[in-house]
Amino acid sequence: MMNMVALMGRLTYDPELRTTPTGVSVLRFQVACDRNYQKSGAERQADFIDCVAWRQTAEFISRYFHKGSMIAVEGAIQTQNYTDKDGKQRKSVEVVANNVSFCGSRNENGGAPAPQGRNNNFSQPAPSYASADSSDFEEIVDDDDLPF
């Protein structure tokens, strides 16, 4: 069996990080995804998909995304049955985000900075190792005692 979802769209509102009573970070958000087809003479339609993120994923979204940001979400669909205040049986469907990524240009995302520990200067090319010398490498002692 397989339950995998991949979405790319824009956040419909500013995400708000919350914490459960046990201290676990949780964040609910909604992604607007344009449909691939459009009736002639009609406006383009979009689907608004409810999502939830937990722990570090929730904290990452809270820190780097805001309303209108392009986001790619990988996760799984989760359904829940409940009874509303009028006593009617209802079903909710949401995507539990396992992994999220930036999409679009940096300006499109409001100039969101790269996560800490990554190169924040996108205008410089990656370093070239074509001119490396032997001091750039460490010698590995081959004692024929491999760990595998």
Image (cartoon, helix red, strand yellow):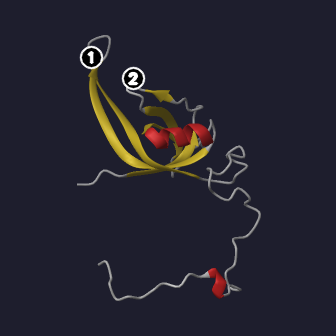
The image quadrant of residue 79 is top left
Dividing the picture into quadrants, the one containing residue 22 is top left
Vertical comparison of 6 with 51: above or below: below
Q: Please indicate, yes or no, whether residue 79 appears anywhere in the rendered image.
A: yes
Q: What type is the residue that disc 1 sits on?
A: Lys
Local crowd size for mark 2, using a 10 Å CA cut-off: few (<14), some (14–19), many (≥20): few
Residue at horizontal 50 percent and vertical 35 percent from the top: 30
* Quadrant including the C terminus: bottom left
Q: Is residue 124 above or below residue 18?
A: below
Q: Circles 1 and 2: CB distance less than 8 Å?
A: no
Find residue 65 and report its horizontal and vertical position in percent. Answer: 61, 41
Q: Earlier in the sequence, mark 1 or mark 2?
A: 2
Residue under pointer 2: 21
Identify which residue, 121 or 93, lies in the foreground.
Answer: 121
User: In the image, what residue occupies the spot 30% across and 50% down?
Assistant: 3
**Residue situated in front as seen by the camera: 131 or 67:** 131
Q: Which quarter shows the N terminus?
A: bottom left
Residue 39 seen anywhere in this rendered image of the structure: no
> Mark 2: which amino acid?
Pro
Estimate the x, y position of residue 49 in percent, counting from the top left.
46, 38
Q: Which mark is residue 88?
A: 1
